[in-house]
Amino acid sequence: MPSSGKRFRDNNRLKRPDEFKQVFSSKHRSSDNSFLFLASRNNYDWPRLGLAVPKKHINSAVERNRLKRIIRESFRLNKKKLKGNDIVVVVRNKLDVNKKNIALILAKHWDKVI
């Protein structure tokens, strides 16, 4: 079932450990001090996203959830060019969630990972 371009639907999520494992074994990567993006092709006509935002790097649940919302929104806006890919975003270091440039950093990674 393809997803609408306007929403982040359930079929746009990576859910099972084997789906994450397949993406982690892929060679398509993009990274900087804050994020690691991993990508692999999927058998669908739509992209799927998995998130790994550890407590170790973002202590506050409010900030972790806010960062996940920001990443999902950026993914939703870039869905058309990510078509047919599974992508996992891993937060690598402490990050100020209130910074306005997070969207620019994410946009650079979306272009680089595919």
Image: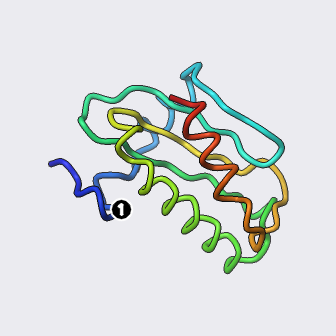
Amino acid on which the number 1 mark rests in the picture:
Phe
Kindly give the residue lying farthest to the bottom in the view shown. Answer: 62
Colour treatment of the image: rainbow
Identify the residue shown where x is 47% and y is 53%.
75
Identify the residue shown where x is 40% and y is 38%.
81
Residue 69 sits in which quadrant? bottom right
The location of residue 107, given as percent across then percent down, is 60, 47
Q: Is residue 32 above or below residue 104?
A: above
The location of residue 58, given as percent across then percent down, is 78, 66
Q: Is residue 15 above or below residue 19?
A: below
> Circle 1: is it few (<14), some (14-19), or many (20+) Cα within 10 Å?
some
Question: Foreground residue, 6 or 46?
Answer: 6
Q: Is residue 48 above or below residue 65?
A: above
The location of residue 13, given as percent across then percent down, is 38, 52
Residue 16 sits in which quadrant? top left
Q: How many marks?
A: 1
Give the left or right position of residue 74, taking residue 93 as reference: left
Which residue bears the numbered disc 1? 8
Question: Foreground residue, 69 or 62?
Answer: 69
Identify the residue shown where x is 50% and y is 28%.
114
Identify the residue shown where x is 66% and y is 47%.
90
Q: Is residue 28 above or below residue 58?
A: above
